[in-house]
Amino acid sequence: RGIGSALVRESLRRMRNAGASGIVLVGDPGFYARFGFGNARGLVYQDVPDRYVLAADLAGSSPTGRIIAHTAFDVSDI
């Protein structure tokens, strides 16, 4: 128990250390809110309900635009 939370905390730490300005993900807002993730109002990810598109601001700016995932994440071929 707690492995998922530990992974998220470590990921946030590594991204901050790498100088990332933020992180965007698709996930459960109830889980990720405790780590500083909130609805990414300025982002659009086709075919994903807005409430699951989350962002954590690491540098004082909110991302905007359209999210395009790598084709490795395309499950339409399965």
Image (cartoon, grey):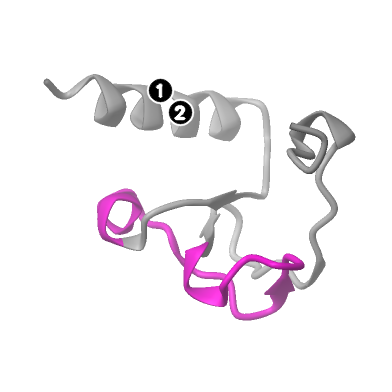
Quadrant of residue 73 within the rendered picture: top right
* Residue underneath mark 2: 13
| Position of residue 22 measured from the top left corner of the image (x, y, whole percent) | 62, 50
Magenta residues?
Answer: 30-52
Badge 2 marks a residue whose secondary structure is helix
Q: Amino acid at mark 1?
A: Glu
Residue 23 in the image: above or below residue 6: below
Quadrant placement of the N terminus: top left
| Position of residue 65 measured from the top left corner of the image (x, y, whole percent) | 82, 71
* Residue underneath mark 1: 10
Quadrant of residue 43 within the rendered picture: bottom right
Residue 21 in the image: above or below residue 65: above
Residue 5 in the image: above or below residue 52: above
Residue 3 falls left or right of residue 60: left
Q: Decide which of 30, 58 is in the foreground and name it.
A: 30
| Position of residue 62 measured from the top left corner of the image (x, y, whole percent) | 65, 70
Residue name at image x 59 percent, y 64 percent: 60
Residue 59: image tag: none
Residue 73 falls left or right of residue 10: right
Residue 54 in the image: above or below residue 51: above
Residue name at image x 31 percent, y 59 percent: 33
Labels 1 and 2 touching (C-beta < 8 A)? yes
C-alpha separation, residue under disc 1 versus residue under disc 2: 5 Å
Residue name at image x 24 percent, y 19 percent: 3
Residue name at image x 74 percent, y 32 percent: 78
Q: Amino acid at mark 2?
A: Arg
